[in-house]
Image: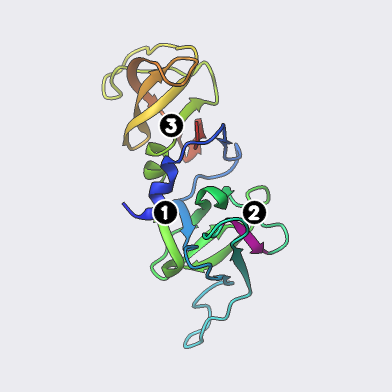
Amino acid sequence: MNYNICTFFIVFFGSLLTVGAQSELGEGFFSPNTTEAETLYLYDIPNSRAGSQERPIDSITFIKRYANHVDGIGYAPEGFAPFNEKLDYGVFLIRVKRLGRDYHEIIINEETGKTAYVSAWQGNFITWGEFLLNCHSVEFIDKNQKVFDNPMIKSAGRVVSPTNFRARYIMGDWMEVEILADDYNTVKGKGWIRWKKDDKLLINSNLFS
């Protein structure tokens, strides 16, 4: 696992991450290379003209403000609102709408759904599974959603309270979890929850503690 993904293990105060109810999940996340403060170039529709060389339409720059590593954005297009940006803690996640061989289509404004393209070589792709397994905890959007002992066996399931969980394994739409107490630390049991359905997210995620 590369360095950028490992930054998810940093412990910090609460940071609840959500995706709009009407928003499709997409393929995962793009985490730009920021170790050398390089510029992330944004493109319109790549390969739209045969034999043409792609030219960026805009860019995002990074700065070192208070440390010897990148900890902030120097410039970004107006309205830039990514999924999560905490560069001072080494985290910068942009949702990927379409995953490509050379370019990814990314969502640069989570409120409007506006997209642009980035070179696949300017960062790392992170799946939803990798992201959720490295979150501190997750919780149901609908507090009446049920926990199951086995997703492969039809059962009534059970409602738990509080609905705080820590992911152990991801299998398709399902997630095996530890059921957590109010302190988000004490493990009360284990079970399976459905974390997405019809490409819609059923949980919120806490990246940090």
Magenta extent: 71-76
* x, y percent for residue 98: 47, 58
The residue that appears at 51% across and 74% down in the rendered structure is 46
Along the line of sight, the residue nearer the viewer: 72 or 119: 72
**For residue 44: magenta?**
no
Image: 157 above or below 120 = above
The kind of residue on which mark 3 rests is: Trp
Apparent side of residue 159 relative to residue 86 in the rendered image (left or right) = left
Prevailing secondary structure of the magenta residues: strand
Q: Amino acid at mark 1?
A: Asn
- Outermost residue on the bottom side: it is 51
Name the N-terminal-most of marks 3 and 2.
2
Q: Is residue 107 visible?
A: yes
Question: Pointer 3: what residue?
Answer: 195
Image disc number at residue 109: 2
Check disc 1 and report the residue beneath it: 4
Crowd band around label 2 with a 10 angstrom C-alpha radius: few (<14), some (14–19), many (20+): some
Picture layout, residue 162 above or below residue 37:
above
From the top left corner, tell me how far across and down residue 200 is, in percent: 50, 37
Q: Is residue 126 visible?
A: no
Write down the quadrant of residue 71 in the picture.
bottom right
Q: Residue at x 58, y 43 (%)?
A: 23
Helix or strand or loop: what does disc 2 sit on? loop
Mark 1 or mark 2: whose residue is earlier in sequence:
1
Q: Is residue 51 above or below residue 13?
A: below
Give, as a three-letter code, the residue at label 2: Asn
Q: Position of residue 112 (x, y in %)?
A: 68, 51
